[in-house]
Amino acid sequence: MNILVIGSGGREHTLAWKFAQSERVEQVYVAPGNDAIAEEPGCQSVPIQENDHEKLVAFARENRIGLTMVGPEAPLVDGVTDAFTEAGLTVFGPTKAAAALEGSKDFAKGIMQKYNIPTAAYATFTNPDAAMSYIREQGAPIVVKADGLAAGKGVVVAKTEEEAIEAVTAMMQDHRFGEAGSRVVIEECLEGEELSFMAFVHGTAVVPMVTAQDHKRAFDGDEGPNTGGMGAYSPVPHLDGTWQAEAERTILRPMAEAMVNEGVPFTGILYGGLMITADGPRVIEFNARFGDPETQVILPRMMSDLTDTIEAVLAGEEPDLVWTEEACAAVVIASEGYPGEYKKGTTFTLPVPVSDKQRWFHAGSKRHHEQWQTAGGRVAALSTLAPGIDEAVSRTYETLGQTPLDGLFYRRDIAHHVRKKS
């Protein structure tokens, strides 16, 4: 069959690469894709923007697309899966109504509260003065979130009341995130370690994946502003096992059932962004798609066929997935200045992977006269499989150290939580 992946980043590069491994897949198209995806065997970039639903549906019909996978959140929230479903095409992703789990933090918190899914205490505001008064009542640390989509940058973990009030001002009065910040959710600050736990879902059929840990802060030591993610690793040995089973039982399955009960059944990738607290797993946020860069460490560990898995889940089955025992680590290289202002068009040379266990997944890059140039904030991620976390991380950094990356930066402490415990 032919596959269509919607999106253009590192997550979509990884999805295309994984789909192309299936013996049943003839061609993987990625819209709009990127120059690196176009170089993958069996993959082709298609110049259709992810928000052009009409052209995407027409392309799927014309090219006998048997399955469409939606990568990013924006087209999901805009209803791209509804357009495909109405056209009688098979698509793996939530409807516009179900994608509100990610598109509105207030919606997600309301469902969690109604169905007793463990999460942080919260309040929602459309009035900035009321939000600031609440912050002064609650004190700091406290978390301020733009209700809508903000490309992974609409969350401020404020250490002081002043910082929280500045966040409210930026979101609600300065409109830093546009309409997404016209409503804010203010939460208690949970303490613990974060864990990314995703599952293939269709209605009440839930097939969990292995866990991963993302690194959201821009700089070493978890300092600096939140980004879309600067690196990840899988598995997460010190947080797996008991917590994983509990999170499946108390969070992922109850949310899938809650969405069915609410009349908005969920199909696609249900992503639980969790905090493992002293009292167990608590939900920080739900996403409605694969995480980025978690995809770049989870799919390389997946030995099961991705196409077969999705088709089985769409049939209401819960297949047993097979995973390699190897660990995987990925380090993101980003343009200097990211997640703030950064320059595009910087020429760079990528270090050559040292084995077939290591590979680049591209996001904000483009080919220009046979050279790579930056075209976004997060440029690419180097992903490495190895027998253990330490080795996966070490090999990644050894390769990155082979070539100067002028105009780019990366964190040098990915997986520091688990490495300092080992």
Image (cartoon, helix red, strand yellow):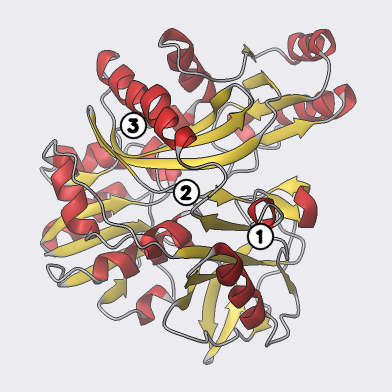
Mark 3 in CB contact with mark 2 (< 8 angstroms): no
Tag 3's secondary structure? Answer: loop
* The quadrant where residue 377 appears: bottom right
Q: Amino acid at mark 1?
A: Ile
The residue where tag 3 is placed is 96
Q: Quick one: quadrant of the C terminus?
A: bottom right
Going by the picture, which residue comes out furthest to the bottom?
370
Between marks 1 and 3, how big is the CA–CA gap?
34 Å
**Residue 75, relative to residue 43: is it above or below?**
above
Q: Residue at x 52, y 87 (%)?
A: 354
The residue where tag 1 is placed is 414
The residue where tag 2 is placed is 291
Report whether 223 appears left or right of 111.
right
**Residue 313 disc label:** none
Counting residues from the N terminus, which is met first, the one under dot 3 or under dot 2?
3
Tag 1's secondary structure? Answer: loop
Pick the front one: 5 or 294: 294
Between marks 3 and 2, how big is the CA–CA gap?
18 Å
Pick the front one: 5 or 14: 14
Pick the front one: 304 or 308: 304
Counting residues from the N terminus, which is met first, the one under dot 1 or under dot 3?
3
